[in-house]
């Protein structure tokens, strides 16, 4: 049985229609015209226990609306949602026991109190047994190296320290599912790596399911095998990162350093671009032309000092999808069942 | 699911500890109380020197009234539910909703913890106040009735604050409303001037308002204007306000929650 399941999950926000201007404001006071904004247009997905999924989309795509419905703090307009067998919004409190949340931009720690006191409070809230609490706290303290600032008031912690505290706080009650919303935002590379190692470790050792929402695609590349893309409220891709890469990887870029500066470059069958007068980039479809053919054509036409082929970065793929929309290429298989 | 008291005890303890970290504020409160007390004493003494005692209340009784009112304010002026407003504005109310807890009860325990710390200031403040004024001490029975009435007033006051802070779910900002309500309730609640000083008709109105349940009723019990024979009626009226506000708060809270879970806050 999947641990998270949604079917045709939909959320429409309704707000009072506002007419601009002072007269409009007055009109708004008395008229009750509504505008509906569809935030999520029918999302169907299913996650098995122990998966680590990247949930990606541009701002306003409907990511956090989906997450809110999964955590039970938002009632869907229609559709089905189930987390660990529970319909979250019907039994919010019970659902809360199975889930953990980490918001990169918001802390659930007690600002004025030493870090350890927030943990004690969470122990009381979730009714974690003293043995379990001890064991988890020792484990996280070691893994996240929190020993030296356990007694420091949270407001005096660095962002990296605070994030580590927030991670431990979200995991103390052994949740089955953890939602991560931009967990590495604003962190330096070392702290980012520490957090990523922690997520990967917990996922591996405890089989905790993670849904990772982030704009930092390095997080996703490092942690997730599966990626779910959402745009304008609709799922546009659900599958392995490799599938996405292969689907878009039909296009490669040949980067060529020229011996002599050029004003203009052109090759049949490739999109050419001059980055600097001596650096040209040729984007080509590997199904219609082999790299070898392109290299030959280029070297025949221009004196070349160096050549390399660029694999598409996940980031550039996603950027292209945001810009152009997802277009499934014939040999790619989007929306896995 | 089984209800557990532990989290709420823990909330109160943490709120207590949190308040204790603001030591300067705590001392300032005591200082400001003493200044206010001194000024009130000067005002009343000057007024009484010019006029006959209004409503048959002698000067020492009014000084006692004022002193006790100020000591009560140490506790009653703590708006324990302002965290509702803060958390709604920051949006962290969403994380609170993701916890397996009863939120209004959480706010109450948190407010209670804050109050407890400030309540500890009552005795030292009283001792310091005795350097400025002399106060009457009634019989233990009256003191007990006063304490009970004070507790009821505390609950009414909490619910009043809770209601106002919950407005934040709709308006985000409640400061102006709260300031107005605070002034009105200080004046009409009998914190500054005993309500029995209001002229006939007006007195009937202000005594019937909920604000009287917070300060006036316990204070009038303390100074003896409400005799033991009227205690049941006084308590009943406080209880009625408490119950009424509790029902109202339940509805408003439900509306607020609905707004969050349907509109997304």
Image (spheres, coloured by chain):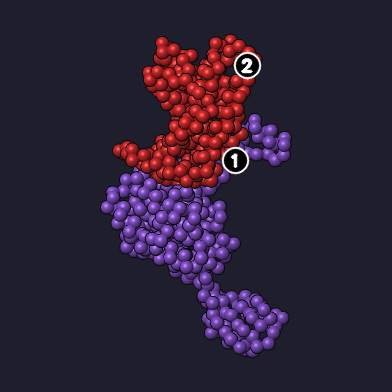
Query: Is the residue marked by circle 1 packed among few (<14), some (14-19), or many (20+) residues within 10 Å?
Result: few
What color does chain A have in the rendering?
purple
Q: Is mark 1 on a helix, strand or loop?
A: strand
In the rendering, at what x and y percent does residue B196 appear? 55, 14
Quadrant of residue B14 within the rendered picture: top left
Is B16 in front, or is B173? B16
- Please give the name of the residue rendered at 38% of the width and 20% of the height, measured from the top-left corner: B140
Q: Is mark 2 on a helix, strand or loop?
A: helix
Is A103 in front, or is B13? B13
- Decide: is A83 above or below B56: below
**Residue under pointer 2:** B49
Task: Tell whether A155 sits left or right of A175.
Answer: right
Q: Which numbered tag is attached to residue B99?
A: none
**Residue under pointer 1:** A35
In the rendering, at what x and y percent does residue A173 appear? 34, 51
Question: Quick check: can you spot residue B163?
Answer: no
- Please give the name of the residue rendered at 56% of the width and 64% of the height, measured from the top-left corner: A319
Chain letter, disc 2 residue: B
In the rendering, at what x and y percent does residue A141 appear? 36, 60
Query: Is the residue marked by circle 2 packed among few (<14), some (14-19), or many (20+) residues within 10 Å?
Result: few
Quadrant of residue B123 within the rendered picture: top left
In the rendering, at what x and y percent does residue B55 appear? 56, 11
Question: Quick check: can you spot residue B59?
Answer: yes
In the rendered picture of this protein, how many numbered marks are placed on residues? 2
- Please give the name of the residue rendered at 49% of the width and 59% of the height, measured from the top-left corner: A158
Q: Is disc 1 on the same chain as disc 2?
A: no
What color does chain B have in the rendering?
red
């Amino acid at each position: 049985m999947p641990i998270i399941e949604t079917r045709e999950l939909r959320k429409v926000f309704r707000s009072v229609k506002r007419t601009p201007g002072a007269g409009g404001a007055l009109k708004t006071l008395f008229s009750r015209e509504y505008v509906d904004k569809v935030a999520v247009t029918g999302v169907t997905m299913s996650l098995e226990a122990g998966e680590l999924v990247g949930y990606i989309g541009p701002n306003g795509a409907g990511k956090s609306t989906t997450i809110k419905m999964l955590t039970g703090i938002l009632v869907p307009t229609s559709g089905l949602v189930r987390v660990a067998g529970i319909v979250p919004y019907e039994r919010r409190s019970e659902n809360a026991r199975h889930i953990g949340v980490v918001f990169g931009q918001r802390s659930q720690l007690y600002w004025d109190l030493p870090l350890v006191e927030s943990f004690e409070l969470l122990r009381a809230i979730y009714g974690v047994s003293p043995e379990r609490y001890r064991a988890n706290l020792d484990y996280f303290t070691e893994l996240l190296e929190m020993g030296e600032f356990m007694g420091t008031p949270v407001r005096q912690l660095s962002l990296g320290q605070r994030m580590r505290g927030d991670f431990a706080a979200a995991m103390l009650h052994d949740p089955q599912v953890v939602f991560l919303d931009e967990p590495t935002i604003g962190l330096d590379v070392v702290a980012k790596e520490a957090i990523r190692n922690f997520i990967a470790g917990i996922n591996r050792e405890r089989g905790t399911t993670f849904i990772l929402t982030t704009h930092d695609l390095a997080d996703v590349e490092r942690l997730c095998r599966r990626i779910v893309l959402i745009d304008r409220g609709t799922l546009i891709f659900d599958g392995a990162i490799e599938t996405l890469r292969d689907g878009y990887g039909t296009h490669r870029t040949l980067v060529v350093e020229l011996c002599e500066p050029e004003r203009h470059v052109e090759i049949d069958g490739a999109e050419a671009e001059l980055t600097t007068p001596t650096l040209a980039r040729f984007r080509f479809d590997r199904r219609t032309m082999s790299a070898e053919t392109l290299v030959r054509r280029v070297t025949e036409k221009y004196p070349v000092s160096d050549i390399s082929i660029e694999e598409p970065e996940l980031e550039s793929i996603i950027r292209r999808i945001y810009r152009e929309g997802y277009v499934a290429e014939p040999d790619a298989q989007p929306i896995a069942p | 699911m089984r209800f557990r008291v532990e989290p709420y005890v823990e909330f109160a303890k943490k709120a207590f500890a949190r308040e204790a970290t603001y030591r300067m504020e705590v001392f300032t409160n005591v200082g400001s109380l003493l200044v206010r007390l001194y000024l009130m004493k000067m005002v009343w003494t000057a007024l009484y020197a010019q006029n006959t005692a209004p409503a048959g209340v002698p000067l020492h009784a009014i000084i006692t009234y004022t002193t006790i009112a100020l000591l009560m304010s140490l506790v009653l002026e703590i708006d324990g539910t302002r965290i509702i407003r803060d958390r709604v504005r920051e949006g962290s109310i969403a994380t609170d909703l993701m916890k397996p807890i009863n939120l209004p009860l959480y706010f109450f325990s948190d407010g209670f913890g804050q109050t407890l710390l400030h309540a500890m200031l009552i005795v030292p403040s009283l001792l310091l106040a005795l350097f400025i004024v002399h106060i009457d001490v009634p019989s233990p029975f009256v003191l007990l009735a006063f304490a009970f009435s004070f507790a009821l007033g505390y609950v009414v006051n909490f619910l009043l604050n809770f209601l106002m802070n919950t407005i934040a779910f709709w308006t985000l900002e409640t400061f102006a409303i709260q300031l107005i309500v605070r002034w009105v309730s200080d004046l009409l609640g009998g914190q500054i001037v005993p309500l029995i000083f209001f002229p006939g008709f007006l007195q009937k109105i202000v005594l019937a308002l909920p604000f009287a349940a917070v300060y006036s009723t316990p204070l009038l019990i303390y100074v003896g204007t409400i005799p033991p024979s009227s205690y049941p009626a006084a308590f009943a009226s406080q209880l009625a306000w408490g119950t009424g506000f509790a029902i109202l708060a339940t509805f408003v809270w439900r509306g607020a929650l609905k707004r969050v879970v349907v509109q997304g806050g």
